[in-house]
Amino acid sequence: MPRKLQSTRHSDAPASSEAPEVSAEERSSTKERILDSAEELFAQKGFDGARTRDIAARASVNISTLHFHWKSKEDLYTAVYQRQIARRAELAKEVIAVFMQANDAPDRWAAIAQAVVALLFHFFRRYPYAARLDSYRLLEEAAPHAALQQGQALLLSVAEQLRNFLPKDLAPTADVALNILSVNALLREYFAGPEVFGELLGEADRSRLEARLQQHVQQHVTRLFRMFESGPGHADPTVE
């Protein structure tokens, strides 16, 4: 059964909450450093395993500074996920832009799929902890409900926007959202544990493994686009 978050508000919080004497610019930089450290440790150990004192040490700040910005570990965890959602929102804008800029050439779905998949792989390479954070969230169900709602709202918004580029009677928003989730699940599985993924597929070379996976995902996404355009039972199985 999923475990509920146990508050560290009293056990870990400093006795004094006075603000350190630093400038606004320094304070912003400190917050980002703490968020970076928290993101790394939550990705490595999950919510239960990551301690605020270890996060503070990784960020080279004292525990009172961490608790000045975030009163509890739950607050810090929420901030990490809100930043993740903001990053994914930027990714969504880039994906939508690909569709808006696409022309009506016969091979447009293959071209769109190539561009979109390239964006997805770039995202997970740029934010290497994103996949493991998601994996722990699914296992622990530790993300606060508000953060999950924001993620759900973003997913449905992207699905509805993508639906505008597809035949509306053949591509319900729910179907588009489900396919977004399926692609994300595959990439999460890989980027959360590429070594294990490589062992399962018998490929030790990381660059070859990633190229193989990227080609597979691109072909899969191309098929999905053509299936939506052709309608149920008339999917074009060919790929470029």
Image (cartoon, grey):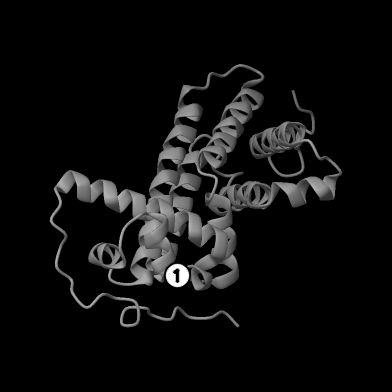
Looking at the picture, tell me which residue is in the foreground, 152 or 166.
152
Asked if residue 211 lies left or right of residue 138, the reply is right
Q: Is residue 76 above or below residue 116?
A: below
**To which quarter of the image does residue 77 belong?**
bottom left
- Please tell me how many numbered marks the rendered image carries: 1
Q: Is residue 99 above or below residue 79?
A: above
Asked if residue 233 lies left or right of residue 130, the reply is right
> Label 1: few (<14), some or many (≥20) within 10 Å?
some
Q: Is residue 23 above or below residue 19?
A: above
Q: Position of residue 74 (x, y in %)?
A: 38, 71
Looking at the picture, tell me which residue is in the foreground, 148 or 27.
27
Q: Residue at x 52, y 39 (%)?
A: 123
**To which quarter of the image does residue 115 belong?**
top right
Residue 150 visible in the picture: no
Q: Residue furthest top?
A: 105
Q: Position of residue 98 (x, y in %)?
A: 50, 27
Q: Position of residue 235 (x, y in %)?
A: 75, 37
**Placement of the N terminus among the 4 image quadrants:** bottom right
In terms of secondary structure, where does tag 1 sit? loop
Asked if residue 206 lies left or right of residue 142, the reply is right
Under mark 1, the amino acid is Arg
Looking at the picture, tell me which residue is in the foreground, 11 or 4.
11
Q: Position of residue 212 (x, y in %)?
A: 76, 34
Q: Residue at x 61, y 53 (%)?
A: 178
Residue 126 visible in the picture: yes
Q: Residue at x 55, y 65 (%)?
A: 45
Looking at the picture, tell me which residue is in the foreground, 28 or 85.
28
Q: Residue furthest right?
A: 202
Q: Which residue is identified by label 1?
A: 51
**Placement of the C terminus among the 4 image quadrants:** top right
Q: Residue at x 26, y 67 (%)?
A: 64
